[in-house]
Image (tube, grey):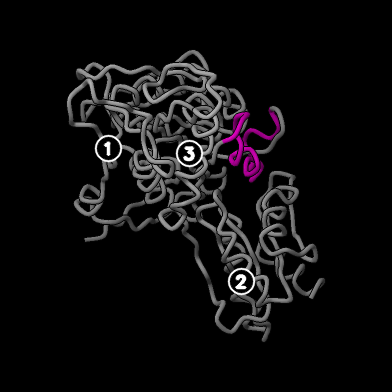
């Protein structure tokens, strides 16, 4: 039975983590994500978990990675400047294939930017938060319900693909306080999918010796199976190597384990698209203003509809291409200078996409979008 609660997006992200079986949080307070840590610090000890405020954002993710290596579900939360500091260790988690959930509540930037104001400025960063070749998995909540459900999904995906999964909120949705409808807790618990483990003889265990479209199988530390963690290119046992073919296959697998299973990742919302003549693409909190604008536009006889990607990376490129073929009039709405617009243009194979952007720390109003639609179409 569904649950109705009055809460904020940040609090719901923390509640979701505990409901998903998270047992460790390592972090450092940073506006506008601090409430995630505040709330989970109250909740985790009640279920036998641990929350540690570390000395900085770097230490926060290091602690969470260490906890995950021991076999428990772990999370950290931050905002854009913290993501920048966590970048190196996000790369370590990608290379060593350590599952982890990172909640990023976006604010204005670059640098210190607008700490208390809204932005969607971390979208490009979330695609490649660290250097090197790998495939990021990034989800984006568009309402309060999804601040809960997307964090739940992130934990399951992190264990399925054995890598960090980023959940983007933004200041508006993180601090929004209203009613949310959550799935039944028993349903959430039943849907938890723990990471795979190896059950055979220890001498046969090869954690990274898996098929080219599959993630590593990392048994919890201290459980009788020995292997090596490293950020270097490594062999089937995790030990550093520069052997040409082994290195090539490793990076190829980091791509293929995601690319060949996109059907498990893609999620989006289509709103009033069936009879639409104008396509508006928006995500996160901006999509709430887009929806209201569409309703008002239709009251005036202007048939608009919305496509909202929930999984931002890897992008829904095939669906975007289909929509690009169907709609002549396309408007991208973002609280940045057009970070996802570049992906929309690539996927659709066209450069004539109209854009509405805002980078002054204020959210869109529905009227902003209505005015833009009337101006360009």
Q: Where is residue 290 in the image (x, y as percent from the top left)?
A: 61, 65
Quadrant (top left, top right, bottom left, bottom right) of the C terminus: bottom right
Q: Distance between the residues labelled 1 and 3?
A: 17 Å
Location of mark 2 (residue): 322
**Mark count:** 3
Q: In this view, does 63 lie above or below 17?
A: above
Look at the image and tell me whether residue 57 can be seen.
Answer: no
Location of mark 3 (residue): 253
Give the side of residue 52 with respect to residue 111, left or right: left
- Which residue is pictured at 34% across the width and 58% down the height? 181
To which quarter of the image does residue 227 belong?
top left
At mark 3, the secondary structure is helix
Give the side of residue 120 with respect to residue 185, left or right: right
Q: How far apart are marks 2 and 3 (CA)?
A: 28 Å
Quadrant (top left, top right, bottom left, bottom right) of the N terminus: bottom left
At mark 1, the secondary structure is loop
Q: Distance between the residues labelled 1 and 2?
A: 36 Å
Camera-near label (1 vs 3) is: 3
The stretch in magenta equals 112-133
Q: In this view, does 32 lie above or below 176?
A: above
Q: Earlier in the sequence, mark 1 or mark 3?
A: 1
120 falls in the magenta region: yes
Q: Is residue 248 above or below residue 138?
A: above
The label on residue 196 is 1
To which quarter of the image does residue 289 belong?
bottom right
Residue placed farthest to the top in the image? 55
Q: Where is residue 87 in the image (x, y as percent from the top left)?
A: 58, 26
């Amino acid at each position: 039975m569904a649950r109705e609660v009055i809460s904020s997006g940040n609090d719901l992200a923390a509640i979701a983590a505990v409901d998903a079986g998270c047992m460790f949080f390592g972090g450092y307070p940073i506006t506008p994500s601090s409430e995630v840590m505040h709330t989970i610090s109250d909740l985790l000890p009640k279920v036998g978990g641990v929350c540690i405020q570390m000395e900085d954002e770097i230490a926060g993710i290091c602690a969470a990675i260490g906890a995950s290596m021991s076999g428990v579900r772990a999370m950290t939360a931050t905002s854009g400047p913290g993501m920048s500091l966590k970048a190196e260790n996000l790369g370590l988690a990608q290379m060593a294939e350590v599952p982890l959930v990172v909640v990023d509540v976006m604010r204005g930037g670059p640098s210190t930017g607008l700490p208390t104001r809204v932005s969607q400025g971390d979208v490009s960063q979330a695609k490649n938060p660290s250097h090197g070749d790998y495939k990021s998995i990034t989800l984006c909540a568009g309402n309060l319900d999804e601040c809960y459900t997307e964090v739940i999904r992130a934990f399951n995906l992190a264990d399925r693909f054995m890598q960090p999964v980023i959940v983007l909120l933004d200041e508006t949705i993180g601090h929004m306080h209203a009613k949310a409808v959550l799935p039944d807790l028993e349903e959430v618990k039943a849907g938890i999918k723990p990471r795979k483990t190896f059950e055979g003889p220890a001498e046969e265990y090869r954690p990274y010796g898996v098929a080219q479209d599959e993630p590593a199988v990392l048994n919890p530390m201290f459980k009788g199976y020995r292997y090596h963690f490293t950020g270097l290119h490594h062999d089937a046992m995790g030990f550093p190597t520069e052997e040409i073919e082994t290195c090539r296959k490793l990076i190829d697998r980091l791509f293929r384990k995601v690319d060949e299973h996109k059907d498990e990742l893609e999620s989006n919302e289509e709103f009033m698209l069936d009879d639409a003549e104008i396509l508006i693409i928006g995500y996160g909190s901006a999509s709430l203003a887009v929806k209201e604008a569409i309703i008002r536009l239709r009251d005036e006889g202007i048939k608009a509809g919305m496509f909202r990607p929930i999984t931002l990376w890897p992008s829904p490129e095939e669906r975007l291409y289909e929509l690009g073929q169907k709609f002549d009039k396309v408007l991208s709405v973002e609280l940045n200078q057009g970070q996802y617009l570049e992906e929309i243009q690539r996927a659709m194979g066209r450069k004539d996409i109209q854009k509405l952007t805002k980078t002054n720390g204020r959210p869109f109003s529905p009227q902003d979008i209505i005015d833009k639609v009337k101006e360009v179409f």
